[in-house]
Amino acid sequence: MQHGLRRIAGGFPLSLRLIREIHTILLRGGRGANRTPGEFRRSQNWVGGTRPGNATFVPPPPERLMECLDSLERFFHDEKHKLPILVEAGLIHVQFETIHPFLDGNGRLGRLLITLLLCSKGALREPLLYLSLYFKTNRERYYDLLQRVRTEGAWEEWLTFFLEGTEITARSAADAAKQILTLFAKDRDHIQTIGRAASSALRVHEYMQKKPLAVIGAVSDELKLSIPTVTVALDHLVRLGIAKEVTGKRRARVFGYSRYLKILSEGTEPLKQ
C-alpha cells in the first residue's frame, strides 16, 4: 500500500505496471512467494474444486488475460462514465477478482486496490478505509455476490453490499479514531503528573503513538535518548498502566501500548468455523 501511494504521489499512474510492482512486494517472503510474484499468470487458475471441471469459478484463460486487463486499466482512467467514486471502486474490485490475473495473492491485492484507488482519486487523504474485515465477517455473502455478478449480472445487489460495507467500515474507523485521540489525551495528562521525569516519558509516549510496540534500543536510537533514560521512561509508563511488557523476558523486552492496541485490534479476532 505504502509503495503504491508513494508512486502515485510521485506522479506515477494507477496502472497494470504499478499493480505488478505491488504484487511483487505483497508476496515477498509471504504466502505465495514461489508463485511468480509480480508476473501475470501464464496458466489457467480456478477457485474452489480440484480442477477447472469441478471449480466454483474459472477465470479467463491466459490467452485472453491481457485483453481483460487492458480493459480494466482503461477503466481506471475513464472520465466519461461519471460514476460516483465508490461505485467505481466496487465495479473495479469485482472485475479484478473475476480476471484473477495472478497465481496467488489476488484476494489480498484486490482488497488493497479499493483503498489505493480511493487515495489516487483524492477520496481519501490517508489509507484509512480497508474493507478486509467486513468481507471476512460476511465471507459467504461476499463470495456468493461475486459469483452472482458473474452468472446473473447481479450488480445492484453487489453494489448495495459494497456500499453498506464501506459505510460500516468508515464509521468504525471514525469511532476508533475518536477513542484513540481521547486515550492519548488522558494518558498525556497522567504522564504530566509524574514531575521532572515527564519530559522524556512524554517523548516515549509520542513515539508509541506511531509504533505501539516498542523496543528500548529502537526508541533510544530514534529519539536520541540514552538507554537508561528510555528504560526509566518506560518504567513510568508501565506504572501508570499505559505500557505493558509483552514478552516476559529480562532482555530484548518489548513494550506494548496495550489500550491503544486493544482499540486497533477490536473485531479482528479469528472467525469461528
Image (cartoon, rainbow, N blue to C red):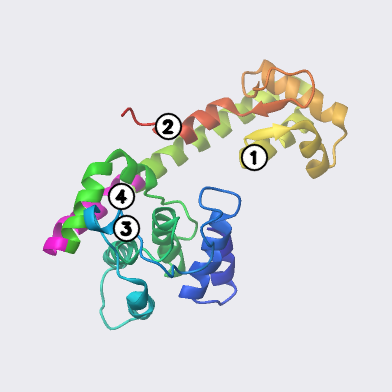
Three-letter amino acid code at disc 4? Thr
Rendered image quadrant of residue 216: top right
Q: Is residue 254 magenta?
A: no
Rendered image quadrant of residue 105: bottom left
Percent position of residue 77, x then y: 38, 79
How many labels, in total? 4
114 left or right, relative to 218: left
Mark 2, residue position: 266
Q: How far apart are marks 4 and 1 (CA)?
A: 43 Å
Residue located 41% across and 44% down the image: 173
Query: Of callouts 2 and 1, which one flags the residue occurring earlier in the amino acid sequence?
Result: 1
Mark 4, residue position: 50
- Secondary structure, mark 4, is loop
Foreground mark, 4 or 2?
4
The one of 65 and 63 positioned closer to us in this rendering: 63
Foreground mark, 4 or 3?
4
Three-letter amino acid code at disc 2? Glu
Query: Of callouts 3 and 2, which one flags the residue occurring earlier in the amino acid sequence?
Result: 3
- Secondary structure, mark 3, is loop
